[in-house]
């Protein structure tokens, strides 16, 4: 049959990959979704107990779906996974934060351990071998810590409920990946600073608040009076980029039974943050800083590693921030735009 005069068919657009983000009413979920939804190759399902936050200014708003529900409810989990068929990947971001976990052990167990375990088992049965990216934390480390950087060889010894429950889940994920049930990475996040929005129940919340609140003309309480105290931090922008890179990372980059990555960050002191606040926000902003010792919070944050070696994640192709100045300037510049 002659095809003379027929116009060639347009190539079909690729079917978007379905991505679930749990805990999408928080900060990191919408941060990641904003990046994914500027790419036509992704359809994103946002879910949380509260209404998930849809990022503003996204290029493909037609590719986002929100589902409000309790991730601890098996019926809701089933409906969530059905809505995402066929699922390409899931980012597990939901959970009770550090100070909240310490205050309510039972709630942390139910949300940070049991709900994640049950979700993983549902994924095993519904989408075997699916890519799972789990948000763990540097809080898996505790004393005794080495005098220098924490390296990959340092054993996790969490001193708080939050870190202990994160480590429990990491081990469960390691075994599920080893057996081929899922294709997983556990990402040990640094403290993200500077987060926009409101203070959270994280013990580290002040590390954003001491920049964010003064820039709004509001007071921030720093719960430790030692300005040499150091924390391991990363910016929202570097975390967003690294999450995208892990989404497409080759599974074989890590051993089958060791699936954690210490995400890149930088070691920053309270004094360095104050200096950067004065430099980019103005000396007058320092009057909003109130230093008051909180023994419970101080115990938690002093149990965390002040610096973690970034050799491995950088070899894996991830990126890190430059300095305290870059963290603070990035946030203050965002207020101007």
Image (cartoon, grey):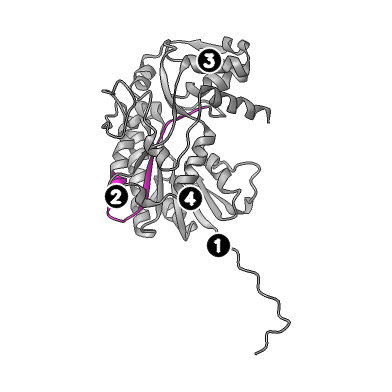
Check disc 2 and report the residue beneath it: 256
Q: Is residue 270 above or below residue 16?
A: above
Check disc 1 and report the residue beneath it: 15
State which mark lies toward you, 4 or 1: 1
Quarter in which the N terminus is drawn: bottom right
Check disc 4 and report the residue beneath it: 20
State which mark lies toward you, 2 or 1: 2
Dot 2 or dot 3, earlier in sequence: 2
Residue 189 lies within the magenta run:
yes
What crowding class fits label 4: few (fewer than 14 Cα within 10 Å), some (14-19), or many (20 or more)? many
- Label 4 – label 3 distance at C-alpha: 38 Å
The residue positioned 30% from the left and 37% from the top of the image is 167
- Label 4 – label 2 distance at C-alpha: 23 Å
Residue 282 % position (x, y)? 63, 14
Q: Nearer the viewer, residue 285 or 111?
A: 285
The residue positioned 33% from the left and 40% from the top of the image is 113
* Label disc, if present, on residue 332 of the rendered structure: none
> Are discs 2 and 1 less than 8 Å apart at CB?
no
Q: Nearer the viewer, residue 86 or 109?
A: 86
Check disc 3 and report the residue beneath it: 274
Magenta residues span 172-193
């Amino acid at each position: 049959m002659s095809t003379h005069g027929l116009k060639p068919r347009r190539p079909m657009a690729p079917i978007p990959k379905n991505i679930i983000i749990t805990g999408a009413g928080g900060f990191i979920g919408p941060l990641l979704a904003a990046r994914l939804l500027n790419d036509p190759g992704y359809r994103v399902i946002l879910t949380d107990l509260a209404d998930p936050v849809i990022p503003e200014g996204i290029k493909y708003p037609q590719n986002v779906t929100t589902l409000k529900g309790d991730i601890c409810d098996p019926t809701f989990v089933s409906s969530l996974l059905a809505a995402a068929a066929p699922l390409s990947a899931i980012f597990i971001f939901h959970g009770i934060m550090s100070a909240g976990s310490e205050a309510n052990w039972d709630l942390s167990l139910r949300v940070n351990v049991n709900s994640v375990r049950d979700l993983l088992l549902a994924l095993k049965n519904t989408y075997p071998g699916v890519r799972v990216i789990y948000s763990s934390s540097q809080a898996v480390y505790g004393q005794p810590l080495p005098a220098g950087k924490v390296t990959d060889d340092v054993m996790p010894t969490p001193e708080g409920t939050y870190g202990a429950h994160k480590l429990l889940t990491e081990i469960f994920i390691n075994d599920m990946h080893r057996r081929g049930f899922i294709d997983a990475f556990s990402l040990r996040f640094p403290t993200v600073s500077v987060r926009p929005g409101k203070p959270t129940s994280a013990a580290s919340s002040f590390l954003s608040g001491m920049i964010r609140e003064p820039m709004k003309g509001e007071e921030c309480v720093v719960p430790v009076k030692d300005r040499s105290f150091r924390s391991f931090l990363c910016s929202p922008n570097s975390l967003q980029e690294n999450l995208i890179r892990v989404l497409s990372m080759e599974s074989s980059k890590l051993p089958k039974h060791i699936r954690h990555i210490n995400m890149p960050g930088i070691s920053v002191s309270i004094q360095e943050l104050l200096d950067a606040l004065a430099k980019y926000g103005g000396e007058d902003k320092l009057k909003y800083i109130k230093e008051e010792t909180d023994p419970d919070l101080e115990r938690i944050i002093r149990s965390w590693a002040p610096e973690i070696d970034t050799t491995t994640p950088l070899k894996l192709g991830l990126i890190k921030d430059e300095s305290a100045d870059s963290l603070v300037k990035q946030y203050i510049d965002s207020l101007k735009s």
